Image: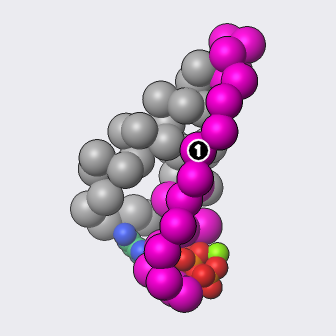
Amino acid sequence: MLIGRNGELNRAASRVGAASRGHGGLLLVSGEQGVGKSTLVAAAFWP
Ligand SMILES: Nc1ncnc2c1ncn2[C@@H]1O[C@H](COP(=O)(O)OP(=O)(O)OP(=O)(O)O)[C@@H](O)[C@H]1O
Ligand SMILES: [Mg+2]
């Protein structure tokens, strides 16, 4: 379960939605080791 990160999640989920409608793009997710990058991306794909 993702805690906080609402802004980041909205942005990532929005890109996933656009991609699923045929609008490709690039989303850079960066941050320190263990800060939650993989968790964020997983939540964007599988809410
Ligand atoms: N916002 C969050 N809410 C809940 N749990 C979180 C959050 N951010 C990180 N965690 C937890 O912290 C741990 C590390 O998260 P995660 O693996 O997503 O980090 P990462 O940035 O992908 O790390 P790495 O750089 O090693 O790939 C996981 O157990 C994850 O569930
Ligand atoms: Mg990771």
State the predominant SS element of the stretch in magenta: loop
Q: Residue at x 54, y 59 (%)?
A: 29
Q: Find residue 2 and report its horizontal and vertical position in percent.
A: 39, 63
Q: Nearer the viewer, residue 43 or 19?
A: 19
User: Label 1 sits on what residue type?
Assistant: Leu
Q: Is residue 47 left or right of residue 23?
A: left
Q: Which residues are magenta?
A: 19-41
Q: Is residue 11 visible?
A: yes
Residue 15 is inside the magenta segment: no
For the N terminus, the image quarter is: bottom left
Q: Residue at x 37, y 50 (%)?
A: 8
Residue 41 position (above or below residue 25): below
Q: Nearer the viewer, residue 47 or 14?
A: 14
Label 1: state its secondary structure: loop
Residue 33 position (above or below residue 1): below
Residue 34 is inside the magenta segment: yes
Farthest-out residue, top: 21
Q: How many numbered marks appear?
A: 1
Tell me if mark 1 has few (under 14), some (14-19) or many (20+) residues whose alpha carbon lies within 10 angstroms of its own: few
Q: Residue at x 67, y 16 (%)?
A: 23
Q: For ligand 1, tell me if the residue under mark 1 lies within 8 Å.
A: no
Q: Find residue 17 and report its horizontal and vertical position in percent.
A: 57, 24
Q: Is residue 35 left or right of residue 24?
A: left
Q: Find residue 7 and report its horizontal and vertical position in percent.
A: 28, 46
Mark 1 sits on what residue?
27
Q: Is residue 10 left or right of residue 47?
A: left
Q: Is residue 39 visible?
A: no
Residue 36 position (above or below residue 41): below
Residue 26 position (above or below residue 8): above
| Figure quadrant of residue 26 | top right
Q: Residue at x 60, y 67 (%)?
A: 38
